[in-house]
Image (cartoon, rainbow, N blue to C red):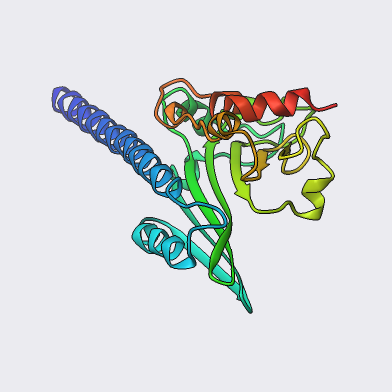
Amino acid sequence: MKKILIWARRFLFALLLLLGAAWVFAEASQWLLRYRAQKLFTDIRTIEVNRSSSTEAEAILSKWSRYGTTISNCDGDLCRSSLIIRHLVPAVLRGVPGEEAWNLLPRLVDHLGLRNEGVGIGFTTEHGIVTRKEFGEMVALPVEDWYIRDHAYVPDLDVWTGEAAKFHDYELRRVSTSHPFRMVRNQKGPYGVLVTFKPEEDPSEKAALMNFQFSCMTQFFPCRSEREILPEGWQMLQEQP
């Protein structure tokens, strides 16, 4: 019996040590993604809509492609490219949709400072010139918040800001006469925040609409609102009629 107790203690100690090491590795991975996100953000801000060349945009995509997934499509002289870099917890810890789903382990992980997250960039080029650029940050919501927005399934805080030479038709419908050079909308229902502004927008507004916060990627307690990622974009959305 004594030997069994000794081995049980050793096993428990080894298990705790292994779990601790796994937590440290996951936490370090989140900090590494945050570091890369800030560097990627710095790089995309060097691109100027209507001025920078497709070669400059491609250089940024090439620089960061080894860390994420890149997609590029061209139709004649019109090309669209994007890059997403993600940090994902193991599948068993991510949870499954459904208001009645138990999701015990994912709920536990929510209280350990670990979460799915990612960053991304996008470019549109026409005739070799960048006509649209985008930057986005995605951070998982805690499981208990997935259905609090009118019972819609919202698992992430997904925030994107883009600068564009011209608005798409669906964006024009969101532009107000009081602010003709910017628009904001949800991606779908209450999910996500998408902001687009034109080069003619006031420089101070441009700065506010690109004022991404990265603390949600590494802080121990989870963020629960897009306001914590992009305050100005969230405020714009609240002010819409």
Q: Is residue 141 left or right of residue 70?
A: right
Is residue 225 shown to the viewer in this render? no
Q: Residue furthest bottom?
A: 76
Q: Residue sitting at 73 percent across and 39 percent down?
A: 183
At 54% across and 55% down in the image, what residue appears? 122
Q: Residue at x 64, y 51 (%)?
A: 164
Q: Position of residue 10 (x, y in %)?
A: 17, 29
Q: Position of residue 212 (x, y in %)?
A: 50, 32
Front one among 162 and 141: 162
Tell me if 179 is positioned left or right of 51 in this view: right
Give the quarter of the image for residue 65: bottom left
Quarter holding the C terminus is top right
Image spot of residue 46 (x, y percent): 42, 48
Q: Position of residue 188 (x, y in %)?
A: 76, 43
| Nearer the observer, 42 or 27 | 42
At a point 46% along the width and 52% down the height, the residue shown is 47
Foreground residue, 227 or 26? 227
Quadrant in the picture for residue 199: top right
Tell me if I can see residue 29 in this picture.
Answer: yes
